[in-house]
């Protein structure tokens, strides 16, 4: 190519760092134009930071004079030249030391104590030096895993009720956890493993018959721990993988690519953790010094913060966030030390006072919840480090207050947006895809909030002497949940949401005090109840009322005769669509969507009064089609429930 294109410029892209001794690419293409390194990806939020934890067993190599001692031993043993070279090779790889039975036993027991105790229970990979060791580690971990479950079961009788629940959950998690060996296939592997006293056949059978790769990538699959020696170390992304147990000497780009298995972004995952059993940190520092020595600008950034830090930095981050949270609470009259020192009813009262103080405005509430969330995530990331125990008492009241605040607002119903995302993926990714049949609970009785069940007289009496902001927060949450359910059924009710938000904004800005907000919320609840009963007064079902509102709002001047005609048209349209057009998966097929659109236009054209101009008719038919598309899933399923 150089000969054929002597004046061409050559440009290379690589995902593998160019390590010392592997500079041929640089020799051909020249120096770096741009480098996007680990630290930049962490800063961008494309990856999570990595933390390093040294858990090297005491049996690990500590003799700095190994070479001199080796020479002395070789002289005394009077080995021939071939035997000397073989022994030197074996000890240069530290193979015998790494594969000693007592060392592997110690590591297996440590892994069983460490992995289930992590706060974020992501997936884990145990990286062994070879196939035989991977199988041995699997067998040893299985043995210690079963023993640990029995040990925890024995502790159940002597713990408190609260601790018992947590212990039972941990036992259940360990019981359902699945693990497997995943190694590349080789010739004569059965005989080779048998010679070492190992049976690879059940592992190979499982690797061939089960789709272990897909299972390991699923965050909710109980297949949580895998033993590898080469496969899945590079080029294999599992975002929920949070812990790498390294027991294989590695260096340069192989080490860099391997640790990147733990830095993928996943919900609730603060960081990836590298647990070092073999002493790879020296090589890791060398690799990072080379790979991270140049930033995208080409300037030296070797003094910058490293993308892989000692776990003590994570502990320090937790301490800093706790201090920030304590300061924020003190600024609003909440003293966490007093809560920690209190007990019984006194503690409960102080916790309730703290909640009332921290829900004063939306800004204060959100600020506290954000800090509490960071505290909890960092605390989980530090586990099972012994230092985490020192923070347990500090974290507990912060977590309890956050839970109490969240309990004031019922959980949001996100099934509609999830349905829309699913539909978008169906349209965007493939013409035919997998189908997940699911129920849509928007219109069942359990999901509704009955405002008539709120005794506002009793609530008003409590408001006079109780924690006003807490009562308002709970009432706001109840009304918000009710309002969102009503809007989902009838999008023309969006003006109620605007009024509700304006009321909250006035309170947050200080235009309303707590008493005035309470009275406005009470009045607003009455209006929602009236709106909910409007279908009965209009002699329409909830579905028919929605179509009627879409056809008549914003207000159109209709006489009584025209109103009756619009209602009849809404009934006819709904019946026709349900009977003939809203078939299974109609939204996924272009022809079916077109038929629904044409049916809407035909029925509306035949039934609506002449006051609907062509422009108004087009607006209304489009609005009705969009509602039908959003609300009706096909085969009787809709936001209003599933047909019997």
Image (cartoon, rainbow, N blue to C red):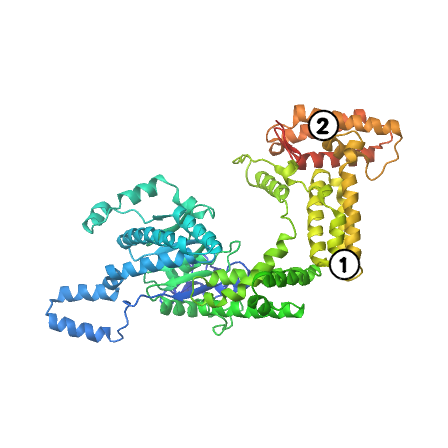
Coordinates of residue 337 in the picture (x, y in percent)? 58, 69
Q: Would residue 217 be seen by someone viewing this image from the given angle?
A: yes
User: In the rendered view, does 524 fall on the left or right side of 43?
Assistant: right
Q: Is residue 362 above or below residue 608?
A: below
Q: Is residue 294 above or below residue 463?
A: below
How many badges with numbers are in the image? 2
Q: CA distance from mark 2 to mark 1?
A: 45 Å
Q: Quadrant of the C terminus?
A: top right
Q: Would residue 232 be seen by someone viewing this image from the given angle?
A: no
Front-lying residue, 422 or 289: 422
Coordinates of residue 140 in the picture (x, y in percent)? 29, 53
User: In the rendered view, does 45 fall on the left or right side of 60?
Assistant: right
Residue at point 57% right, 38% down? Answer: 426
Q: Residues within 10 Å of mark 1 (few under 14, many from 20)?
A: some
Front-lying residue, 284 or 451: 451
Coordinates of residue 340 in the picture (x, y in percent)? 56, 66
Which callout, 2 or 1, points to the residue nearer the camera? Answer: 1
Residue at point 11% right, 67% down? Answer: 79
Residue, disc 2: 574
Give the image quarter of residue 625: top right
Rendered image: mark on residue 373 = none
User: In the rendered view, does 553 fall on the left or right side of 261?
Assistant: right
User: In the rendered view, does 191 fall on the left or right side of 312?
Assistant: left
For the residues labelled 2 and 1, say whether their Cβ atoms are less than 8 Å apart: no
**Which badge, 2 or 1, is on the more N-terminal residue?**
1
Residue, disc 1: 514
Q: Residues within 10 Å of mark 2 (few under 14, many from 20)?
A: some
Coordinates of residue 281 in the picture (x, y in percent)? 37, 68
């Amino acid at each position: 190519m150089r000969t054929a294109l002597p004046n061409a410029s050559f440009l290379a892209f690589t995902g593998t760092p160019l390590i010392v001794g592997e500079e041929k690419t640089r020799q051909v293409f020249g120096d770096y134009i741009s480098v996007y390194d680990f630290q930049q990806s962490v800063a961008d939020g494309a990856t999570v930071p990595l933390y390093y934890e040294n858990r090297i067993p005491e049996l690990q190599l500590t003799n700095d004079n190994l070479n001199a001692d080796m020479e002395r031993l070789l002289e005394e043993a009077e080995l021939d030249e071939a035997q000397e070279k073989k022994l030197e090779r074996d000890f240069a790889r530290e193979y015998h030391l790494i594969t000693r039975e007592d060392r592997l036993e110690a590591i297996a027991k440590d892994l069983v104590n460490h992995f289930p105790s992590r706060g974020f229970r992501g997936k884990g990979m145990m990286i062994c030096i070879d196939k035989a060791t991977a199988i041995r580690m699997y067998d040893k971990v299985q043995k210690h895993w079963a023993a640990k479950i029995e040990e925890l079961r024995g502790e159940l009788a002597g713990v408190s009720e609260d601790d018992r629940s947590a212990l039972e959950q941990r036992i259940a998690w360990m019981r359902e956890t699945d693990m497997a060996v995943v190694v590349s296939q080789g010739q004569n592997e059965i005989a080779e493993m048998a010679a070492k006293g190992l049976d690879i056949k059940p592992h190979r059978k499982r690797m061939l018959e089960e789709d272990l790769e897909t299972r390991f990538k699923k965050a909710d699959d109980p297949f949580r721990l895998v033993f590898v020696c080469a496969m899945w170390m590079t080029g294999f992304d599992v975002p929920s993988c949070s812990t790498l147990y390294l027991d294989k000497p590695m260096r340069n780009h192989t080490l860099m690519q391997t640790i990147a298995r733990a830095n993928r972004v996943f919900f609730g995952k603060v960081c990836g953790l590298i647990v070092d059993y073999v002493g790879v940190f020296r090589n890791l520092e060398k690799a990072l010094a080379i790979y991270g020595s140049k930033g995208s600008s080409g300037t030296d950034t070797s003094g910058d913060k490293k993308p892989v830090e000692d776990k003590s930095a994570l502990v320090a981050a937790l301490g800093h966030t706790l201090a920030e949270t304590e300061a924020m609470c003190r600024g609003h009259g909440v003293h966490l030390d007093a809560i920690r020192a209190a007990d019984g009813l006194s503690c409960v009262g102080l916790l309730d006072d703290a909640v009332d103080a921290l829900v004063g405005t939306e800004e204060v509430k959100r600020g506290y919840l954000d800090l509490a969330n960071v505290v909890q995530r960092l605390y989980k990331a530090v586990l099972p480090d012994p230092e985490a125990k020192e923070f347990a008492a500090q974290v507990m009241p912060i977590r309890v207050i956050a839970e109490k605040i969240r309990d004031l607002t019922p959980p949001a119903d996100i099934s509609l947006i999830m349905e829309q995302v699913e539909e978008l993926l169906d349209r965007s990714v493939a013409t035919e895809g997998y189908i997940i049949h699911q129920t849509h609970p928007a219109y069942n009785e359990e999901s509704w909030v009955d405002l008539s069940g709120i005794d506002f007289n009793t609530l008003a009496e409590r408001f006079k002497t109780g924690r006003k902001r807490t009562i308002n927060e709970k009432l706001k949450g109840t009304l918000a949940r009710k309002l969102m359910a009503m809007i989902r059924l009838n999008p023309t009710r969006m003006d109620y949401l605007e009024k509700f938000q304006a009321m909250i904004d006035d309170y947050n800005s200080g235009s309303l005090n707590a008493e005035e907000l309470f009275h406005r919320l009470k009045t607003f609840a009455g209006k929602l109840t009236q709106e909910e009963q409007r279908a009965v007064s209009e002699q329409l079902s909830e579905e028919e009322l929605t179509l009627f509102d879409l056809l008549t709002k914003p207000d159109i001047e209709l006489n009584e005769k025209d109103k009756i005609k619009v209602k009849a048209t809404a009934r006819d349209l709904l019946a026709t669509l349900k009977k003939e057009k809203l078939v299974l998966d109609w939204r996924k097929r272009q022809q079916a969507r077109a038929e629904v659109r044409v049916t809407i236009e035909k029925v509306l054209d035949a039934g609506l009064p002449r006051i609907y101009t062509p422009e108004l008719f087009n607006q209304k038919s489009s609005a009705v089609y969009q509602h039908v598309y959003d609300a009706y899933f096909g085969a009787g399923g809709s936001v209003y429930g599933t047909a019997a």
